Image: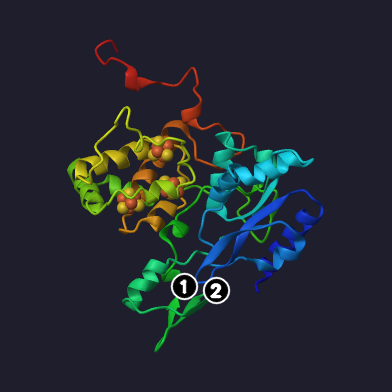
Amino acid sequence: MSDIENQMKEAVKKILKDKSVDVVIGYQMGSLPLRAVPVAIKSAEEVDKLVWNSFCEANLANYIMKRKTDEKAMRERTRGDKPPWERIGVTAKSHDIRSIVALGLENQFNLENIVIIGLPCPGIIDRKKIDKELDGKEILEGSVSNDTIKIKGKDFEKTFPKKDFIFDSCKAHLPFDSSVCDVVIGELPDQVIDDDFADIIEFEKKTPDERWEYFKEELKDCIRCYACRNVCPMCYCHECFVDASQPLWFGKTTDINDTIIYHIVRAIHLAGRCVNCGACTRACPMGINIRLLNRKMAKTVKERYGFETGVKKEEPAPMATHKLDDPQEFIMDKEVE
Ligand code: SF4
Ligand code: SF4
Ligand code: SF4
């Protein structure tokens, strides 16, 4: 067990014992190899279930949202003498922290009721990359150290360098400020690190036709299962535009035109809101990398409004506010100008 994991358990025990929280959402090992799954811990006795390792993939901001809508828990609380809202602790890596802050800013929950236990991201393993190397062979056991991943199957054992098998979203520069955390374990950056958007700057060098071709090629296999939307912490609308029938915003086919409309409209909805967690790309059964489109929107919002999602607790999202001196040049008539 790592030192970080031990410190995390002590911190969780402390906030449960002193009743600063009712529940802590974290990870426990799953029943399949190379997997950790979310778990809700309600007492100090359960804390030993918790783990912190390179399998802690899910964005736990989603699980805070799920508890908010857990009617059974709400009924239990309103029958007792506790307030109907919970105080929730969460063990969180940088992407999860940014999602939590962004959702708090959008008033999806009161950030004062959330205790963020910030931990350094260990680099999350991309199982699809490992599966590709194994060519369909079943993994029966797996473990990871600082530098290597060890895999065992029925008739084979393999060791992979960890750095080549972590998610691309873990490698990206991430704007992040640890001062939003209530408890910090290990070393987190203590000031905002800038995202240099190097991948997007490279992509912008393509001509408009080349970019269009890129997206058409990338999206041609999309089966419109909406897993990318369902797993996204920022896609929480009670009625998504894709499910509406009155008005019907676009056709329900998998024709490339309908598919592109879905992705463009969703990208616009996520402008200034996507936290670059990569959950959408991980969830896609067709291996489509949709993060690029969302990152392009993030770069535009940063350039226009100087805003990066989920970095500061106090800074309202540009799409949720307006300033009197906003240029608004997109509605100006060029003739009049
Ligand atoms: S669009 Fe994808 S990368 Fe952005 S917040 Fe949603 S799941 Fe995360
Ligand atoms: S795609 Fe748009 S409408 Fe649908 S859930 Fe996401 S933000 Fe809401
Ligand atoms: S998860 Fe993949 S296949 Fe499903 S709608 Fe999103 S991009 Fe298309």
The answer to which of marks 2 and 1 sits earlier in the sequence is: 2
> CA gap, disc 2 to disc 1?
8 Å
Identify residue for label 1: 162
Horizontal side of 287 relative to 163 (left or right) equals left
User: Residue 151 in the image: x percent, y percent?
Assistant: 45, 80
Residue occupying image coordinates x 49% and y 36%: 307
The amino acid sitting under disc 2 is: Asn
Q: Is residue 288 above or below residue 209?
A: below
Q: Which mark is residue 262?
A: none
Residue occupying image coordinates x 40% and y 46%: 229
Residue occupying image coordinates x 58% and y 42%: 69
User: Residue 266 in the image: x percent, y percent?
Assistant: 36, 39
Q: Quadrant of the C terminus?
A: top left
Residue 145 occupies quadrant:
bottom right
Identify residue for label 2: 146
**Residue nearest the viewer, comparing 211 with 236:** 236
Outermost residue to the right: 18
**Colour mode?**
rainbow
User: Residue 294 in the image: x percent, y percent?
Assistant: 38, 44
